[in-house]
Image (cartoon, rainbow, N blue to C red):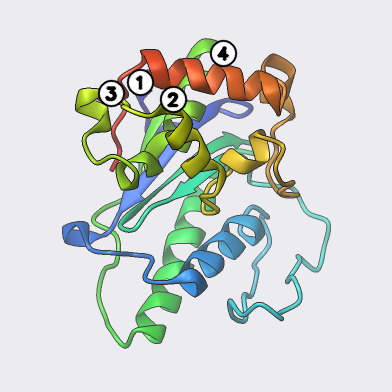
Amino acid sequence: MTVSRKFHNDEFYHTYNRGVDKRKIFRDYSDERRFLKGCKQFRYESPTLLRSATEHDAPVESSEKVQLLVDLASFCLMGNHYHALCKQRMDGGISKFMSKLSSGYTKYFNKRWERSGYLFQSRFQDEHIDDDGYLLRVLCYIHANPLVYFQADWKKEGLRDINGALDFLSRYRHSSHRHYMALEDISWIRSKFIEDILPRGKEYQGFFTEYLQSVRPAGLDGG
């Protein structure tokens, strides 16, 4: 793991950020939906207009078939922070994507909640992932984040109820865990590289369960 400021094409990075003063950046389902719509649309190099986050809006796709800035392999939204696993597709792609995502969501959030100023505490943070083993660990770490809502001290004490934790995560809809569990398909998640190593469904579930049983994620903490 290395902290990076220069991104390389076709390599993975764990990116994350949180609200200023650790304040909530997602107050309800509409906020979460709007952020994920940004994740989907801002992957493209061309400018994109997002009209709103309502359930009935049609998807806003790029007017041209242009190059993707990044592939998104996984994500997780928490109350005051988020994680995303990105692979850069073109020079400057991650920086451009994260800038569009941050500025677009901040404008939306400030307008909706009648506030002003910074929403995120700083420029996003990132870690370069340089081997497949660490890639799978980061994937599991990202998807395990919501367990603080299930058992607040799990990182320190370990999980007291693995089956209960797995059930909780299978119902948590603000991450890509359900995609890898094959409980749903998220069309804009690009998981083929990971699936070639760790197929979705039972094999992912088995690996993830072992991770929860044996790995304490302290030291990977972006939130």
Q: Are marks 2 and 1 in contact (CB under 8 Å)?
A: yes
Q: Are marks 2 and 3 in contact (CB under 8 Å)?
A: no
CA gap between label 2 and label 1 equals 5 Å
CA gap between label 2 and label 3 equals 27 Å
CA gap between label 4 and label 3 equals 25 Å
Does residue 131 appear anywhere in the picture? Answer: no
Residue 181: image x %, image y %?
65, 34
The residue depicted at 38 percent of the width and 66 percent of the height is 26
CA gap between label 2 and label 4 equals 12 Å
The mark nearer the N terminus, 1 or 3, is: 1
Pointer 3 local density, CA inside 10 Å: few below 14, some 14–19, many at least 20: some
Residue placed under numbered mark 3 in the picture: 158
Look at the picture and state if 74 lies above or below 109: above
- Residue type at mark 4 is Asp
As drawn, the label of residue 132 is 4
Residue placed under numbered mark 2 in the picture: 128
The residue depicted at 80 percent of the width and 68 percent of the height is 63
The residue depicted at 30 percent of the width and 42 percent of the height is 148
- Figure quadrant of residue 8: top right
- Figure quadrant of residue 93: top right
Residue placed under numbered mark 1 in the picture: 2
